[in-house]
Amino acid sequence: MFSLFYGLWKHVFSKTEFRVLILGVEKAGKTTLLEKLKSTYTNMEGLPPDRIVPTVGLNIGRIEAANSKLVFWDLGGQIGLRTIWEKYYDEAHAIIFVIDASRPSSFEDSKSSLEKVLRHQDLKGAPILILGNKQDLPEAVSSEELARYLDLKELDERAHMFEAVSAYSGMGIKLAVDWLVEVMERSKRTELLRVRAGAYGNI
C-alpha cells in the first residue's frame, strides 16, 4: 500500500526538469536575464546589473515555474567562445536566444549566429524563444520589427516565439517563461530526451 501511495505522490508532486540554453552575441544581456530570472522565481536576489561582467564559459541558474524545474545554462557570446555552445546542444530541451533590440549594429551578427544554432542537428526540434531585450531603452525596436529583420526561414518547422523583454526591469519575462514551459511539456524533443535518458538508465 505504501508503494502505491508513494508512486501516486511522486507522480503528482514530482516536477519535470528542463534544461534551457541561453545564447546570444556578446552584450545582449544574457547574464542580466539569468539574474532577473533567479530573483523573479526564487527568494534569492540576483546580481545587480552594474556588477555583472561578460561571461567567460558558463553560468548556471535554477528556478521552478509552472510546476517544472528549469536549469538555465548561460553561455558566453564572444566570437571566440561560441564554438563551445554546441557542446551543450545534445542535452538541451530548448533555447533562449537573446538579442539587444537597442543595438541594430549587432543584428546581422545575431542573425548569423542564430541561423547556425537553428541548423545544428543536435538541436533538432528544440523550441526556441527569441527575446528582443533592453525594451527599457527608447531606441529598442519591437519584437515584430526584429522578427521582420531576421526573417528566419528555419523557424517555420519548430515551435518559436518572439517576445519583447527587459532583463533590467523584468518586463515580459514571466510571459516568455510560461510559453517556454508550455511548449517544452508537449515537445517531441522532450519525449526524445526522456526516452534517451531511460535507455541510458537501463544500461
Image: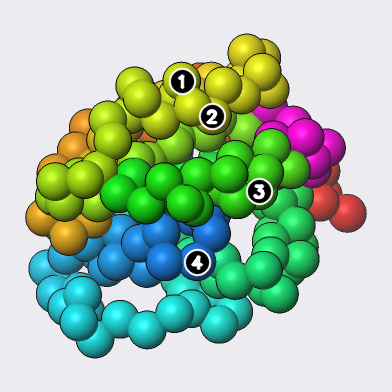
Marks 3 and 1, Cα distance to the nearest angstrom?
A: 17 Å
> How far, Cα to Cα, is label 2 from label 1?
6 Å
Horizontal and vertical percent position of residue 153: 66, 18
Residue 197 seen in the figure: no
In the image shown, does 150 or 199 lie closer to the viewer? Answer: 150
Q: Position of residue 18 (x, y in %)?
A: 49, 46
Q: Which residue is mark 2?
A: 150
Q: How many discs appear? A: 4
Residue at left offset 37%, top offset 84%: 53
Instruction: Farthest residue to the right: give it.
Output: 203
Q: In terms of image quadrants, where is residue 118?
A: top right
Toward the front, the furthest residue is: 105
Specify start and end residues of the magenta stretch as a single range.
Answer: 117-125
Q: Quadrant of residue 167?
A: bottom left
Image position, residue 198 (x, y; %): 73, 43
* Residue under pointer 4: 26
Mark pair 4, 3: CA separation: 11 Å
- Magenta-span inclusion, residue 120: yes
Tell me which numbered mark, 4 or 2, is placed earlier along the sequence: 4
Q: Amino acid at mark 3?
A: Ser
Can residue 57 be seen here? The reply is: yes
Mark 2 or 3, nearer chain start: 3
Q: Mark 1 and mark 2 in contact (Cβ < 8 Å)?
A: yes
Residue denoted by label 1: 148
Task: Please give the label number shown on residue 32.
Answer: none
